[in-house]
Image (cartoon, rainbow, N blue to C red):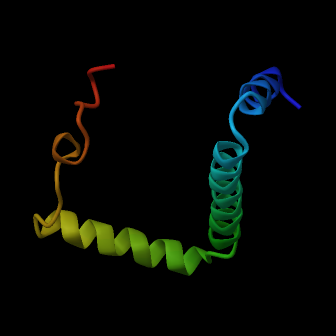
Amino acid sequence: MTELLECVIEQLKILPTDEQDEIATRFLAEIEDERAWKISFASTTDDQWDNLAAMVRQEITAGEFSPLEELFCYKPNDR
């Protein structure tokens, strides 16, 4: 276990049990979501990736896209 995770667990221990359970539920959901995404990506075929890339290129060509500045609160070069 990492030091950071151990620190999180120590902080969780001092919370009331209902808050501990709420946070634990969110962590478990996040872990399951991550597992599902990994399975989904791993099972995606090259043809599916190619089709997706072709769709994105068509959307860009047709002007059917939003600049990143409109999707996120920062500009990519503003780090």
| Residue 43 in which image quadrant | bottom right
Q: Quadrant of residue 56?
A: bottom left
Outermost right residue = 1
Left or right? Give the position of 10 relative to 58.
right
On screen, residue 56 above or below 66: below
Q: Position of residue 45 (x, y in %)?
A: 62, 77
Q: Nearer the viewer, residue 36 or 19?
A: 19
Image position, residue 42 (x, y; %): 69, 68
> Total of numbered circles in the picture?
0
**Residue at x 64%, y 44% (from the top left corner):** 19
Measuring 43% from the left and 78% from the top, which residue is drawn there?
51
Q: Quadrant of the N terminus?
A: top right
Residue 72 at x, y = what percent?
A: 26, 41
User: Looking at the rendering, in which quadrant would you find the C terminus?
Assistant: top left
Left or right side of 33 for 64: left
Return the x and y of residue 37 as percentages of the image width and height: 62, 65
Furthest residue in direction left, as rendered: 63
User: Is 43 placed above or below 72 here?
Assistant: below
Judge whether 20 appears above or below 14 on screen.
below
For the point 67% across and 68% down, the residue is 36
Residue found at x 68% / y 63%:
38
